[in-house]
Image (cartoon, rainbow, N blue to C red):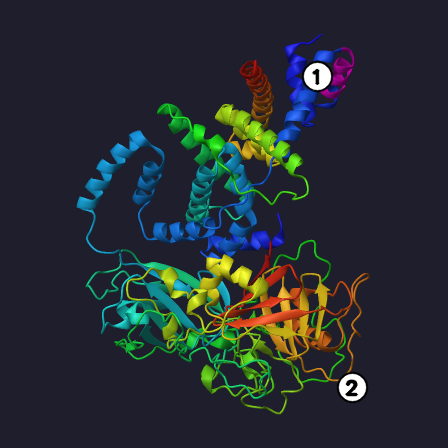
Amino acid sequence: MALDETNWIARARQGDAAAFEAIYQRYERRIYSFVYRMMGNAEDASDLTQDTFVKAYLALPRTTPDLNVSAWLHRIASNACLDVLRRRRIVQWLPWEVFDTNPALEPAAPDDPAGNYLRRETELEVQRILTLLSPKHRTALVLKEYQGLSCDEIAAVMGTSRSAVKSLLFRAREEFRQVSEREQQKGKAAHV
Amino acid sequence: MNSPHVRALLSAYLDGEVTPAEHAQVERHLVSCPECTRILAEYRDLGSQVRTLSRPLPPATLHRDVWTAIEAREGRSAWGTSLAGLLRYGAVTAVLALAVIGAWLLLRPAGPQFAAQPRYPLPGQSGVARNSSVDIEFTRPLATPQPIDQIIQLAPTAPITPTLVHGGDTLLLQGDWAANTLYTITVLSSTLSAEGKTLGHAVTWQFTTGDFLNTPTATPTETPNPTDTPVPTDTPLPPTDTPPPTLPPPTVVALVPTSPPVVPPATVTRAAGPPAPTLPPTAGRPPAPTATAPPAPFTVTPVPAASATAAASATSAVVPSPTPPPASPTASHGPPTATAEPATATPTPVIAHMPPGTTPTASPTPGPQETATSEPISTPGLTPSPGATSTAPPEGTPTATRTPGGSACQYTTQGNFDRVYQDSYAIRSVLGCPTNTERAIVTTAIEPFQYGFMFWDGDQKQIYVFDTSQMVYFVYADTWVTGDPSGGTATPPAGYYAPVRGFGKVWQEHNDVQTRLGWATAPETGAGAAAVQAFERGSMLRTDSQAVRVLYANGAWENVTVR
């Protein structure tokens, strides 16, 4: 952890808004994109990222000085996502409209419209598969492959053991493969 | 061949999470198993697909929404929060939540909550100027008259002058704080609001003073930069196209002290010696230079260092220093003595303590040694300006609105300063309005040190000392002139440098700077084009195209990278 981050955390834990702002600036996009990939749409990503930082701000004074702020923020964010996903499962509501949303992405290369289109299509397909994974598998896979966390870090975020993470990742990859194959079969059937 | 056991290992193998034995087992298996080889390739491919997903940009409103929500939540119970979450995410639970809301609305106490929040110094803050005002904000105006000891408890005691500003919701305690002292301040639960409510609970925090004074930020300048027109921060702003809400004139209601200001008892003598400044752990550091290590290359009036005094007097809690420092116009920065005069009576050539950027180095009270020593010209400490009516909120407005938006300020920000200022509510809140236009710095230099760096504003003859461990900064007048010793005679460890010229003079004269920064890690170089802009409570400094350093009036700074 960078020295300045340690300093920010120490100051933010004492209620220094400017220090928390520095933490926010460092993690805003990282947490937002994580939540976006977990939820699959910009509206949830915005709401839950907001919740994450508000909860973090309010909980900071109760944290310990050796706080790993990255893992901690990811944990708050993933819990927020899992809470919402669990609740939606209970009420049998699936956010199908997520596939119609158009997130604000980085500017695409203006000189490669065809490439941009293909990338866009691929991205939508991958996001669709992610959204169809079980929430825990999705969390593990996104943390590992998208956020680049180690198994130890994922264990800290998910509140589990390293061996459990390894097992989760195996099952997540298997589920991704199966869902991907199923979706491809559906696509072929639709074109027949 | 394609056993589930090996299949399970493929995932861990991909992540490098297998033992050497398992690694060898998987590799042996892959040679003879096309199925597992294909699955491993699929794992790799799906990982690549997820990794290359784009990073969506957060909506521009997110930052504002987060801070707005934080403000709202800080003044509410956890109850209200849960309700908000339920309402947002569950149709079924929303019905229940609505019922609870109804009950809450019926049962909650009427009227807004009455609470207090320290604005300055912040809890745990150190390096507070001895003449700083403590700034406490209340959610409701205070009742007046009201005995100050019904509101504030201070330990150790100190002479304070209470003043209510901003329509009565902000209490300023102008103090004559002892140097290097840990103060505990409590806003008592007996504090009365104008509506007759008492504070829900007492609020206690601590701060530690430094051994220096601030002078008002509106000190007139002798040699103004021709491109700048410094505006005193307490000058009311002229009307703009979009005038701020009509506010009553600043209501300054003096509270009624029930007893005269308490002078610290004799046992709390300043001769006890200040505690050594808290510095980052030195474990693992190369040996930091010490006050005695390098020979002094400059002929200057010695400026006693607080840390040295602390060490010298550590064994004698109440006995005055056996070797009091020589009488010097810099006494306010020297070790405190048993007979220390009130802060305001200390003659000092200390140059103006203004936010850097608009502060020419002229001294309001020139002393005989002002060209010989380099004193900090901007040191930690915030002096709230009771007359800043342009930033006062309408009564009952949430805290955040005290900070003006860009449209309410007389001066505007440009370029990267503007991006940082407009993008960060927190920075705007802390800095307040710009008090001038951006000033380009043409003549610059910069030098990296072990634990920070120095920056030279050659146009204004100022040297900024940035401590990257503690994230604090200091500004010194550059008093080095051609013909002075060039410095650099200290012998650094291999691979390090002793700073020279102006940097060297500041470094040599101030043990604290040496301790904070350590040795230089490279010779000084030109820093290219730079710019600075002053604000009500700090400044912004830009030394390259990507980074903006936000310098707060309390001595803290941060680096903001412009995306």
In the rendered view, tell whether residue A97 sits above or below residue B413.
above
**Quarter placement of the C terminus of chain A:** top right
Asked where in the image residue B285 lies, by quadrant, the reply is bottom right
In the rendered view, tell whether residue B477 sits above or below residue B67.
below
Furthest toward the left, the residue is B106
The kind of secondary structure element at disc 2 is: loop
The answer to whether marks 2 and 1 mark residues whose Cβ atoms lie closer than 8 Å is no
Mostly what secondary structure, the magenta segment? helix
From this viewpoint, is residue B157 visible? Answer: no
Residue A142 lies in magenta, yes or no? no
Mark nearer the N terminus (2 vs 1): 1
| Viewer-proximal residue among A46 and A113 | A113
How far apart marks 2 and 1 lie (CA) works out to 76 Å
Asked where in the image residue B334 lies, by quadrant, the reply is bottom right
- Where is residue B355? Give x, y as percent: 53, 74
Marker disc for residue B483: 2
Residue B26 lies in magenta, yes or no? yes
Mark 2: few/some/many CA within 10 Å (<14, 14-19, 20+): few
The kind of secondary structure element at disc 1 is: helix
**Residues drawn in magenta:** B22-32
The residue singled out by tag 1 in the image is: B38
